[in-house]
Each structure stands twice: as C-alpha cells, then as structure tokens.
Image (cartoon, rainbow, N blue to C red):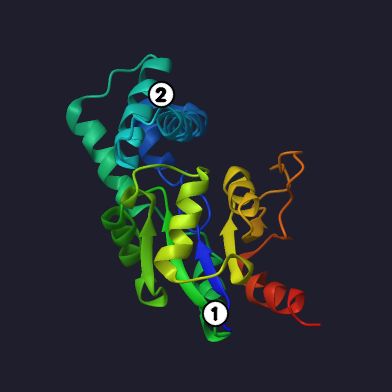
Amino acid sequence: MNSTIAFDIYGTLINTHGLTDILRQHVGNQATLFSQLWRQKQLEYSFRRGLMQQYRDFAVCTAQALDYASRSFGISLAEHDADKLLNAYRALPIFDDVIDGVNNAKNAGFLLYAFSNGKASDIAALLDHAGISNLFLDIISVDEIQSFKPDPAVYHHFLARSSSEAQHTWLVSANPFDVIGASSIGMKSIWLQRSPDLLMDTWEIEPTITIHRLTDLAAAITASTTF
C-alpha cells in the first residue's frame, strides 16, 4: 500500500512571513515583529473559533488578525492598503526546498494531498502561483467541516476524504500544534523544523520523525518503513 502524505500549507510549504517588504512601507524596521504578531493572532483566532464553535473561514481570521496587529503597532491602514496585503496573502512565496522536496515525494510513489486551514480556493491560488498544484491529488480543507486544526475532527475528515488509513498516513507540518494534532488520532507525523530556534512542545506526544529540510522527506519516510 502506498503511503499518503498530507502537506500542511501555511508555514510548511508557504512562507507566512513573505510580506515583510510590503510591511516595511507601513511599519519600517518593525516589519518582522509585525508579521510575527499577525501570524500569532491569525492562529489564535482560528483556535478560539474552533473551541467556541463560532466558525469563520481562515481568510476572516487573517483579516481580523491584520487589524489587531495594525492597532497594536499604532497604525491605521487605509482600506486599499489592507486589501493589498490580504490579496498578497494569496500569493505568498514558497520556501526554497519545496519544489524539490514535493517532487521527490511524488517520484517515490507517495500519494500527496494539500491539507490546510485555508479555504480550498485560497490554497489553489497559492499552489498555482508556486507552480506546484499539479503535484497534489487534491486539496482538503478544514472549511469543508467548518472547524480548524488541531480539532481531531479535521484529521479524521482528511482520512475519510483521502480514503486513507491513519497508520499509512503522514502529516508533514512545520507547526507543532498540527503535528501533535495528527499524532493524537493515530496518524504518523513529520515535524519540519525550519529553524533551530523553533521548539516542539514538551507534551507526551512527539513527532514520528523530525527533519530540517523538505528535501529529506521521502528518504526519511522510506527509511522509517524499511524493516
């Protein structure tokens, strides 16, 4: 049986801090800090909405987080500037190891899916912009069940939609909460530690494998399943 790989998108394949050049036009040398707060609140809002069962799609979380970050930094974005930033979010850059890493996994015979908090249309735009949409069998979005990672329901939804079994399915993510979420329902997990400064949460749940470059993915899975 060919293993299935669920690729997280934001922060894993797509660089969520890829708008710092545009942000510098508004906050100067605080662009990196602004971007970090924007991302932090985006995820926080998705967690809170999932817990409260007050679903709004990820684009709404992103827009509301942008508004929070702007107010926190004491700036008032004009509507056209906010729209420009949110539109740019649909064309964020990929990391430099993505094309080779995903191609290697596909050539190794794995079944590849994009699996994201984002709406399928937004993920399709990102993958098209990156030139890698043809590498995936499908896009599976949490929007289909109106919840967010790491709700166990979204991982079960992925398994159902991809007709996969947990023990033969790998979640690849740079986000520790996502790795823990998938592992907690029996999926195998790969933490893509993109920086040595990033830490995995010290819970009782650990990733099956940790890698540092996506180009190591296919070989790492193959090695782990060779007995």
Q: Residue at x 40, y 25 (%)?
A: 27
Q: Tell me, yes or no, whether the two marked residues, 2 and 1, touch with CB atoms within 8 Å.
A: no
Q: Is residue 223 left or right of residue 130?
A: right
- From this view, report whether residue 227 is shown above or below residue 72: below
> Which of disc 1 and disc 2 is earlier in sequence?
2
Residue 214 point in image, percent of width and height: 61, 66
Quarter occupied by residue 138 = bottom left
Residue marked by disc 1: 110
Residue marked by disc 2: 69
For the C terminus, give its image quadrant. bottom right
Q: Residue at x 38, y 52 (%)?
A: 92
- From this view, report whether residue 149 is shown above or below residue 99: above
- From this view, report whether residue 175 is shown above or below residue 80: below
Residue 218 point in image, percent of width and height: 64, 76
Q: Is residue 29 left or right of residue 54?
A: right
Secondary structure at badge 2 equals helix
Q: Residue furthest top?
A: 74
Residue 69 point in image, percent of width and height: 41, 23
What type is the residue that disc 2 sits on? Ala
Dot 2, how many residues are within 10 Å of its Cα: few (below 14), some (14-19), or many (20+)? many
Q: Residue at x 33, y 48 (%)?
A: 143
Q: Is residue 169 left or right of residue 26?
A: right
**Front-lying residue, 32 or 108:** 108
**Front-lying residue, 223 or 93:** 223
For the N terminus, give its image quadrant. bottom right
Secondary structure at badge 1 equals loop
What type is the residue that disc 1 sits on? Phe
Q: Residue at x 42, y 29 (%)?
A: 45
Residue 127 point in image, percent of width and height: 36, 64
Quarter occupied by residue 114 = bottom left
